[in-house]
Amino acid sequence: MDVVETNQKINSSKKRVLIGITGGIAAYKIPLLIRLLVQNNYEVKVIVTESAQHFVTIETLSVLSKNIVYKDFFNEKYEWNNHIHLADWADIMLIAPATANTLAKLAYGYCDNLLLATYLSYTKKVIIAPAMDAEMWEHPTVQENIKTLKERKNNIVLPVEYGELASGIKGWGRMVEPDFIFNVIQKVIFKANQFNNKKALVTAGATYEPIDPVRFIGNRSSGKTGIAIAEELAQRGGEVYLIYGHIQVPLPHHPNIYPIFAGTAQVMYDACVKYFGEVDLAVLSAAVADYTVENVATSKIKKENDNLVLHLAKTKDILKTLGEQKKTHQLLVGFALETENVIENAYKKLILKNADIIFANISSAENPAFNVDENELIVISKDGISKSLGKHKKYILAEKIVDEIADQLKK
């Protein structure tokens, strides 16, 4: 891959790359990568495992990176090399080459060296570049470990190449070349700056409409998609007001995310109207109740009658209200859950409510949408163009959703 091809202009301030080198013959390629990074205004620090030192010298790595090289929890002066500080220092982490042994340890949370401890402490994007002999690469255990690592939202597991291996045979297992890795780093760093100086409002989860102090009308939304979108926007530099209802996943811990609990449709409506004027974009992914109970009982309703009649009132339409208030510089994104005529119905919703993009959930037996890890989405924009984002884990869909938003903001 040509370096110039995807080379993005980044901020003049140096970005920080932490490289973990493990004990594979492909370690000889890493000094070339370090030099490439330093030449392009990156600051580089390196951690080596004990085995890695058989393939590349600490002196070489130190000279090229212009930093000391870390190899253990304590240095020669018995001073602690704090893995938490190393994790906090880096904008991106790379583990290359990642041997079969290291992949297994990463997959199962082992922590028997400085590199593994740093990985477990790191919360941003980690690029993993596997390298090993063909038979090892094809072993089911290795492939299971690769699958496990790919399913973690902060990991980017690179492919391997086909070619001549250290054993002399040809097969799959070669680590990708330094320029390929460099381009991936560039792309990740570029995305990390996409939403700098942008403020976003994101809704997530379900609203619960009370019947009495212990009962409610609700839905099965877990909040996974909305939470993942908020995290993705924050990781790309945006400040996010996360207005969330009832969720079944942990709240994200990111300095750019400001969580605001809104458990009912009315409270969520009020919060969205309050903060919408401050933001550049709003992504309304929460499953807000369409109806709420008119007269909520102040004490628990006793089960005395065979039937209970509830009078329901329509809730306020958040997307429509924000569409009416939207300024020319603001981007409004909605979601639609459909069971038939998906594109047609979603486009009608977009026009009616003055949204800019609608992401349509396809609800079916094969794609239940709620309370599952995967979902399938179609994106519909104001120009009438629609395309499928495919079926993916929700955190992967969140990346694709934010990519679409970024593209729309460029127009």
Image (cartoon, rainbow, N blue to C red):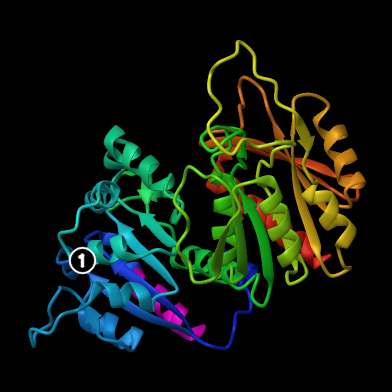
User: Could you tell me residue 145's position as x and y percent?
Assistant: 32, 42
Query: Along the line of sight, which residue is nearer the eye, 48 or 29?
Result: 48
Q: Vertical placement of 192 versus 388: above or below? A: below
Query: Along the line of sight, which residue is nearer the eye, 35 or 43?
Result: 43
- Which residue does the numbered mark 1 point to in the structure image? 52
Q: Vertical placement of 406 versus 269: above or below? A: below
Q: Quadrant of the C terminus?
A: bottom right
Q: Is residue 31 magenta?
A: yes
Q: Quadrant of the N terminus?
A: bottom right
Q: Amino acid at mark 1?
A: Ala
Q: Quadrant of residue 325?
A: bottom right
Q: Which residue is at 15% across, 73% downward? A: 72
Q: Which residue is at 19% across, 79% downward? A: 81
Q: Which residue is at 34% across, 85% downward? A: 64
User: Could you tell me residue 205's position as x and y percent?
Assistant: 59, 45
User: Could you tell me residue 310's position as x and y percent?
Assistant: 70, 26
User: Magenta stretch?
Assistant: 30-41
Are there few (<14), some (14-19), or many (20+) residues within 10 Å of tag 1? many
Q: Vertical placement of 328 versus 80: above or below? A: above
Q: Is residue 309 visible?
A: yes
Q: In the image, 351: left or right of 188? A: right
User: Could you tell me residue 80's position as x and y percent?
Assistant: 15, 80
Number of numbered discs on residues: 1
Q: Is residue 171 visible?
A: no
Q: Quadrant of residue 409?
A: bottom right
Q: Is residue 12 magenta?
A: no
Q: Vertical placement of 300 versus 316: above or below? A: above
Q: Which residue is at 30% across, 33% downward? A: 140
Question: Mainly helix, strand or loop, the magenta region?
Answer: helix
Q: In the image, 231: left or right of 45? A: right
Q: In the image, 233: left or right of 349? A: left
